[in-house]
């Protein structure tokens, strides 16, 4: 093989390795970034669920309009969060959990409307407590599903990080091999010139 062919081959290989490195870096950082965005969404879902429980409890104890309005504000913020975040969850398991959490939020709203109606009409204490208990149980299930979704996302993120480390290690070894190859080529050139 001619020396010029070896140099062209080595240069092409280095350019390909550099492009592969940047491509892998872009791919895996995108995966980790998406997982981080999903984690933030799930944290907001859990926080919103706890806020809904808090404002519902405050409304039952002290039925004032401000607690009802705070509950509605948090509910609307949660709906907006779901609408904006739907494209993030594309994997079937994640999407199924996300959709289930979303549907549960809608059922929480219906239960809260029934609760408000009972409180405003001066309904029986047993009915109000039953509705409050149903709301608590529904929100509890919603929180459990959100935590399960967070665990799925964490696992995907860990897999992407491990794959990135392996790709980095392999690319490092390839670069080391190419460098050694260039050393051999330079030694061949030097010997032929002498």
Image: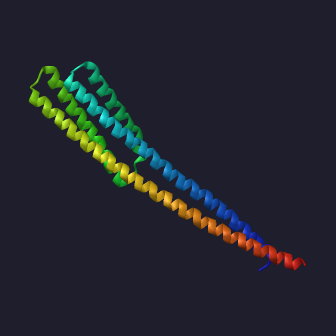
Q: Residue at position x 52%, y 51% from top?
A: 30
Quick check: 17 left or right of 139? right
So how many labels did they put on this image?
0
Q: Where is residue 76 in the image (x, y as percent from the top left)?
A: 34, 30
Establish if 96 lies above or below 168. above
* Residue appearing at x 29%, y 47% in the figure: 145
Residue 182's place in the image compared with 75, above or below, is: below
Toward which corner of the image does residue 53 lie, by quadrant?
top left
Residue 87 seen by the camera: no
Q: Which residue is drawn at 80% across and 73% down?
A: 186
Colouring of the image: rainbow
From the viewer's perspective, tell me whether residue 178 is left or right of residue 188: left
Quadrant in the picture for residue 22: bottom right
Relative horizontal placement of residue 12, taking residue 140 as reference (left or right): right
In this view, the residue in front, 101 or 173, is 173
User: In the image, residue 191 lies at what x, y percent?
Assistant: 85, 79
Relative to 55, is 26 above or below? Answer: below
Q: Where is residue 94 in the image (x, y as percent from the top left)?
A: 36, 51
Mark yes or no: residue 67 visible: yes
Looking at the rendering, in which quadrant would you find the N terminus? bottom right
Report the residue at 85% width, 75% height from top. Answer: 190
Q: Can you name the residue that lies furthest to the top here?
A: 65
Task: Please tell me whether residue 173 is drawn above or below residue 51 in the rendered image.
Answer: below
**On-image quarter of the C terminus:** bottom right
The percent coordinates of residue 24 (x first, y second) are 57, 58
Extreme-right residue of the structure: 194
The one nearer the camera, 12 or 71, is 71
């Amino acid at each position: 093989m001619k020396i010029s062919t070896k140099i062209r081959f080595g240069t092409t290989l280095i350019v390909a390795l550099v492009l592969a490195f940047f491509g892998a870096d872009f791919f895996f950082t995108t995966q980790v970034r998406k997982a981080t965005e999903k984690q933030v969404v799930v944290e907001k879902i859990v926080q919103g669920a706890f806020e809904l429980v808090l404002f519902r409890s405050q409304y039952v104890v002290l039925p004032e309009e401000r607690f009802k309005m705070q509950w509605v504000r948090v509910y609307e913020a949660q709906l907006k969060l779901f609408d904006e975040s739907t494209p993030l969850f594309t994997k079937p398991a994640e999407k199924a959990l996300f959709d289930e959490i979303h549907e549960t939020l809608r059922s929480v709203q219906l239960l809260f409307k029934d609760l408000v109606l009972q409180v405003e009409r001066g309904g029986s204490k047993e009915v109000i407590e039953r509705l409050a208990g149903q709301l608590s149980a529904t929100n509890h299930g919603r929180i459990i599903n959100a935590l399960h979704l967070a665990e799925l996302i964490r696992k995907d993120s860990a897999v992407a990080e491990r794959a990135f480390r392996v790709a980095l290690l392999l690319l490092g070894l390839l670069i080391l091999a190419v460098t050694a190859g260039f050393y051999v080529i330079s030694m061949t050139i030097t010997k032929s010139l002498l």
